[in-house]
């Protein structure tokens, strides 16, 4: 797919005209682009490079690596197309929301059962499918927010919804993570307030996106409670990844040690839920962290520990571990070998199992 086609599709997904896209870039970056120049990009007459690729990345909420890499452009567009909500679907969502308000909607217990189901499905389903379904649930639950437990359920759904946006370094995901934290505060449930912030922090830190926001949310979780919990564990590893990416090796290793101590008390027995952190998933967190730090022996040990208990029903996470190996190769100086290893692992995973996070990791390895 050529870049002009991707620009056109992303612009349409935002509901913008060519003139509006030019205005967005001009406002954000002090340029003087015209509608005609956008049209030339989209028709392939001119190829944007350097500064303009970065400008497009920021205003269209798409990782720069996607714009630069033809293979990533093809797979990314599949996700974007699946996430677009057509007017008829929007109409159905509105009807569902009002119907829920008039009829009272699902019970708190029913919402908590839905959350458990989504937590399991997220681990193996594509982002586009999850996003469409969770969007419908959010329209319904916002009509029922008259109990603290419902605010807690809504906050967890919002956190999941944020994770489905392409490129969590974009404004959309961060906006939803912040709203989820505010919704959790409305629940007045300490565990929910810590979990939502911690889950957002590890998502951003693991993806290497919006590290300042990851730190802020993690620090908020730590300030709310020092009791060992999954939320606190996620927050610690969110901060650890942010520290590693900034080059603060000592802080990252110290946070890793703290996280392992918290896991000893708060680790999960549940193996296949996004709301859980069992032993294998802790080692997925650690594998990437240690690979980023260049700790090859420790990273390899974490990878082996994860693979020993990783459920066969979750092949996407085995691919994560292979990408971590590719990152280690690239960091050791074998960039070509690292990219080849990671690309081979991605190609072995069925396309419908690919995730936005995997593609961002592949971009990190190539960079």
Image (spheres, rainbow, N blue to C red):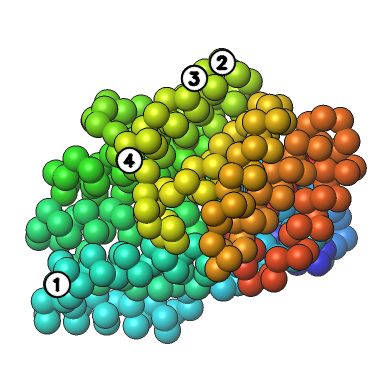
Percent across and percent down for residue 118 are 38, 67
Is label 4 or label 1 in front?
4
Percent across and percent down for residue 37 are 77, 55
Residue at the image point whose x is 42% and y is 84% from the top:
88
Mark pair 2, 4: CA separation: 24 Å
Which residue is identified by label 4?
266
Mark pair 4, 3: CA separation: 18 Å
Q: Is residue 159 visible?
A: no
Percent across and percent down for residue 322 are 71, 50
* Location of residue 31 with respect to 277 vertically, above or below: above
**Helix, strand, or loop for circle 1?**
loop
Q: Which numbered dot is residue 254? A: 3
Q: Which numbered dot is residue 250? A: 2
**Helix, strand, or loop for circle 4?**
helix
Of callouts 1 and 3, the N-terminal one? 1
Near mark 2 (Cα within 10 A), the count class, few <14, some 14-19 or many ≥20, is few
Which residue is identified by label 1?
107
Mark pair 2, 3: CA separation: 6 Å
* Location of residue 131 with respect to 227 vertically, above or below: below
Residue at the image point whose x is 71% and y is 27% from the top:
294
Of callouts 4 and 3, the N-terminal one? 3
Evaluate if marks 2 and 3 touch, with contact meaning CB atoms under 8 Å apart. yes
């Amino acid at each position: 797919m050529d870049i002009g086609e991707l620009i056109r599709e992303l612009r349409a997904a935002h509901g913008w005209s060519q003139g509006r896209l030019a205005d967005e870039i001009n406002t954000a970056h002090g340029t003087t682009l015209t509608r005609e120049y956008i049209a030339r990009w989209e028709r392939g007459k001119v190829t944007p490079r350097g500064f303009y690729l970065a400008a497009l990345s920021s205003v269209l909420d798409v990782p720069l690596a996607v714009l630069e890499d033809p293979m990533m452009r093809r797979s990314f567009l599949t996700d974007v197309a699946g996430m677009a909500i057509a007017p008829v679907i929007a109409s159905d969502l509105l009807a569902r929301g009002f119907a829920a308000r008039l009829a009272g909607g699902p019970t708190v217990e029913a919402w908590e059962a839905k959350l458990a189901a989504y937590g399991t499905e997220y681990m193996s389903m594509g982002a586009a499918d999850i996003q469409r379904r969770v969007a419908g649930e959010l329209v319904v639950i916002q009509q029922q927010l008259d109990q603290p437990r419902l605010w807690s359920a809504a906050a967890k759904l919002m956190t999941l919804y944020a994770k489905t946006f392409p490129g969590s370094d974009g404004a959309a995901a961060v906006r939803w993570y912040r709203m989820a934290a505010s919704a959790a505060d409305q629940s007045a449930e300490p565990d929910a307030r810590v979990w939502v912030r911690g889950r957002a922090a590890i998502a951003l830190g693991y993806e290497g996106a919006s590290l300042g926001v990851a730190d802020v949310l993690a620090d908020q979780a730590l300030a709310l409670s020092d009791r060992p919990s999954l939320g606190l564990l996620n927050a610690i590893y969110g901060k650890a990844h942010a520290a590693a990416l900034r080059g603060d090796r000592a802080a990252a290793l110290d946070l890793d040690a703290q996280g392992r101590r918290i896991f000893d008390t708060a680790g999960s027995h549940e193996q296949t839920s996004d709301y859980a952190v069992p032993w294998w998933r802790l080692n997925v967190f650690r594998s990437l962290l240690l690979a980023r730090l260049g700790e090859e022996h420790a990273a390899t040990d974490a990878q082996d520990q994860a693979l020993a208990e990783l459920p066969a029903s979750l092949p996407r996470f085995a691919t994560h571990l292979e990408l971590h190996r590719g990152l280690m190769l690239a960091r050791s100086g074998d960039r070509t070998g690292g990219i080849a290893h990671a690309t081979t692992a991605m190609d072995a995973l069925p396309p419908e199992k690919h995730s936005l996070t995997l593609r961002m990791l592949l971009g990190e390895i190539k960079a």
